[in-house]
Amino acid sequence: MKAWEDLVGTALLGTRRRGVDVGGLPAEVREIVGKAEDQADAVLVTAALLTNYRRAGRLPVANARREEPAKPDDRRFVPPLARERLARLLHANRPELLEEWLRTAAGRGFRVGPELLPALADAARARVSLRAPLAEVAGPVGAWLGERNPDWAFLVAEVEDDSDDAWQFGTPARRQAWFERALAQDPAAARAALTATWRTEPADLRAMFLTLLGRHLTQDDEPFLDAALADRAAAVRDTAVRLLGGLPGTGLGDRMAARLRECVTVRSRSLRADVLQVTLPGPDETLVRDGVRVPHGPGQDTARLRAIIAAAPLEFWAEFGTPGDLVGMLVEGCPLAVVRESWATAAIRQRDEAWAQALVEAEPGGRATAALVGVLAPEKQAATVAKLARGLKVEALTRLILDLPQPWPEELGRVLLDWVAAQQDHRLVAHAATLIAKAVPSGCLRHRLATLPQPGEAAPWPGAAASWHRAVAETLTFRREMHEELS
């Protein structure tokens, strides 16, 4: 209706600059507006009359149906205190703590009231890690909302849908959710479905589905992974090589060990350390078929050596000595860092604790140290990091802490909190301490660092470090209370 648009223009410009155009109004409205004493009254009267006029002039909707309600959800709502804390988290922009809250609530079988779901769904649009736990606590109501708002479609993707349509015609998110459930509940069906559509999947989905398969890998998957070594997409080839590296006794491992035998020997030297003699491999078409494709130019032979060592089983090296012996050898023919970094890649893929421990001890501040610590058993992680804390400079140690794989075991969490408690003020320490307070397991939340001084009491921290020590204590206290409210 043009009359309404003209009225809005008058209101925006002001009645001193533009009056109400009564000529464009319906006759019934024009008659009443003409009695207004001034233009301001005329604007307000016209707006009220036109609003009702437009509503009254609409035809009733025919064949209207009521929306089907969401499916029932018999789970308990979160307790009142926990609901209040969730509202505070939404407004405080603390996504890590919000994710922890959602995962804790989901793990304890709670659901969130529908009044908070729109705000939570908007938060999850910007942070993917929130989506799965949110969908779980939202339940059928979340799925109902996701079906009606495309921006929240990820809530639908997480709802259990075991039909073939979810895999054949669903969105990538729904297909991923279906594939993950099928791998856990019916692995044979999941693998058959992936095999049937593999050649028609886009490269990014092939890599993603292969990564999901890697979480449920069995020895029977070797032929499928072997075929993926020839994939046209580098991300798929790299994923296949990494996953095959975690399987014992594979053909790829045997082939790489055979090539490695042509490249390395150990030469003993009296009164001095043994030497690992390396011959760099040249171009080899069979390597290309095994997924090792390196760009032409300087360093390509070194790149091939890296790939061969990383993909070969670590048992290959047993004839030359123990992991501790080998990492201490001199290296000739290539840089020492190339060999050590390749060993580290193999140790991480194969989850080999002996090699991981030896490499950490040989190069405590190395680039792969954090990932190698993640290979160790929980008690060894704690002992290793405690030892590193005594030997590394603060800068190196804080970088290591920031890179440690999560989730952390409780033993490691306690070691890190003890380290924070002993530190003076330092910019990098403050940064690491903030992460530690957010990441330590719930079993560490009663650490002495979580004690806030009572009013009138002196803070137990050095003056210059008081601000970030207090922030650590507040975060630990906040998390402890959060878990108690959801218990």
Image (spheres, helix red, strand yellow):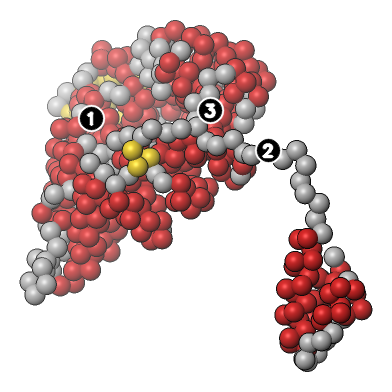
Q: Are marks 2 and 1 in contact (CB under 8 Å)?
A: no
User: Is 331 or 68 nearer to us in this picture?
Assistant: 68
User: How many numbered marks, from 0 up?
Assistant: 3
Looking at the rendered structure, the kind of residue marked 2 is: Arg
Q: Earlier in the sequence, mark 3 or mark 1?
A: 3
Q: What crowding class fits label 3: few (fewer than 14 Cα within 10 Å), some (14-19), or many (20 or more)?
A: many
Looking at the rendered structure, the kind of residue marked 1 is: Leu
User: Is 372 or 405 nearer to us in this picture?
Assistant: 405
Which one is closest to the eye, mark 2 or mark 1? 2
Considering the numbered disc 3 on the image, is that residue within a helix, a strand or a loop?
helix
Residue 419 vertical position relative to residue 456 in the rendered view, above or below: above
Which one is closest to the eye, mark 2 or mark 3? 2
Farthest right residue in view: 23
Horizontal arrangement in the rendering, residue 125 relative to residue 407 (left or right): right
Q: Quadrant of residue 315?
A: top left
Q: Which mark is residue 376?
A: 1
Locate the N terminus by quadrant.
Answer: bottom right
**Residue 38: where, in percent of width, then height?**
77, 91
**Residue position for label 3:** 176
Considering the numbered disc 2 on the image, is that residue within a helix, a strand or a loop?
loop
The residue lying at 38 percent from left, 61 percent from top is: 92
Q: Quadrant of residue 202?
A: top right
Q: Are marks 3 and 1 in contact (CB under 8 Å)?
A: no
Q: What crowding class fits label 1: few (fewer than 14 Cα within 10 Å), some (14-19), or many (20 or more)?
A: many
Residue 377 vertical position relative to residue 114 in the rendered view, above or below: above
The residue lying at 74 percent from left, 87 percent from top is: 40
Looking at the rendered structure, the kind of residue marked 3 is: Gln
Residue 387 vertical position relative to residue 219 in the rendered view, above or below: below
The residue lying at 60 percent from left, 17 percent from top is: 164
User: Is 325 or 235 nearer to us in this picture?
Assistant: 235
**Residue position for label 2:** 65
Q: What crowding class fits label 2: few (fewer than 14 Cα within 10 Å), some (14-19), or many (20 or more)?
A: few
